[in-house]
Image (cartoon, rainbow, N blue to C red):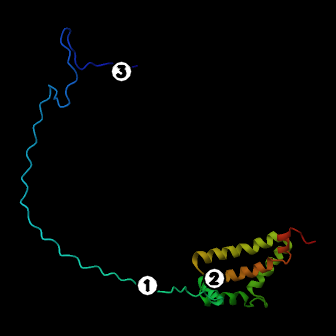
Amino acid sequence: MPEPIIPTKIIPGGAALPSGPPPPDAVPPWREPATPPPPPPAAPPAVAIPAPPPLPEPVIHVHVVLPYEPEPELTRRERLWAWLRQIGRPWQVIGALTLASLPLFDGHSIATLWASAVAEARTEGGQDAGYALALTPLAIAVIRIVQGGGTLGRLLLLAISLTGLAGAIHLYDPVTWITGVQPS
């Protein structure tokens, strides 16, 4: 429904119509003309501000080193040492390897017992069971070392699980992975 039209001015019959729109500066008759704003206050007297002292000349120092010599590349021994330092302190790495290979149980170490258990799992359960049993503690050890640094216990778990991985690997595995031929 359209909105109703509301008249704003009614011109009676016989009266003269307005000549056109009012001029732009015309004030409607129902409004009072605006009073002019008061004059602005007088400006305060000007005070002379002394100019700041001139800044000293800037000193530019140019240091040029020629020719550029890159840092020497690290040797293999230095890279290996830096990598071992990232994993853990050297005494922790040596201690973990010693504890993993120390014969404790009837001439067998913890690492060799784990490797034989993984090899037995591979023999009884197949290749998948051997690798699953070997790679699970290895993954846990690597994740813990990366997240929290190498402690003696974490490095010991890494050394034992690496030896267990050696028990899971068979010589025909790489041939099977590359060629797809199964040994008979």
Residue annotated with mark 2: 153
Label 1 crowd (10 A; few <14 / some 14-19 / many >=20)? few
Q: Secondary structure at mark 2?
A: helix
Q: Secondary structure at mark 3?
A: loop
Left or right: 71 with respect to 33? right
Which mark's residue is nearer the viewer, 2 or 3?
Answer: 3
Left or right: 74 with respect to 64? right
Q: Residue furthest top?
A: 14
Q: Nearer the viewer, residue 6 or 68?
A: 68
Distance Cα–Cα, label 2 vs label 3:
86 Å
Disc on res. 52: none
The quarter holding residue 84 reads: bottom right
Which mark's residue is nearer the viewer, 1 or 2?
Answer: 1
Residue at (61%, 76%) from the top-left corner? 146
Q: Nearer the viewer, residue 30 or 144?
A: 30
Residue at (12%, 68%) from the top-left corner? 49
Disc on res. 3: 3
- Which amino acid lies under the numbered mark 1 shown in the image of this protein? Val
- Which amino acid lies under the numbered mark 2 shown in the image of this protein? Gly
Disc on res. 64: 1
Q: Nearer the viewer, residue 48 or 78?
A: 48
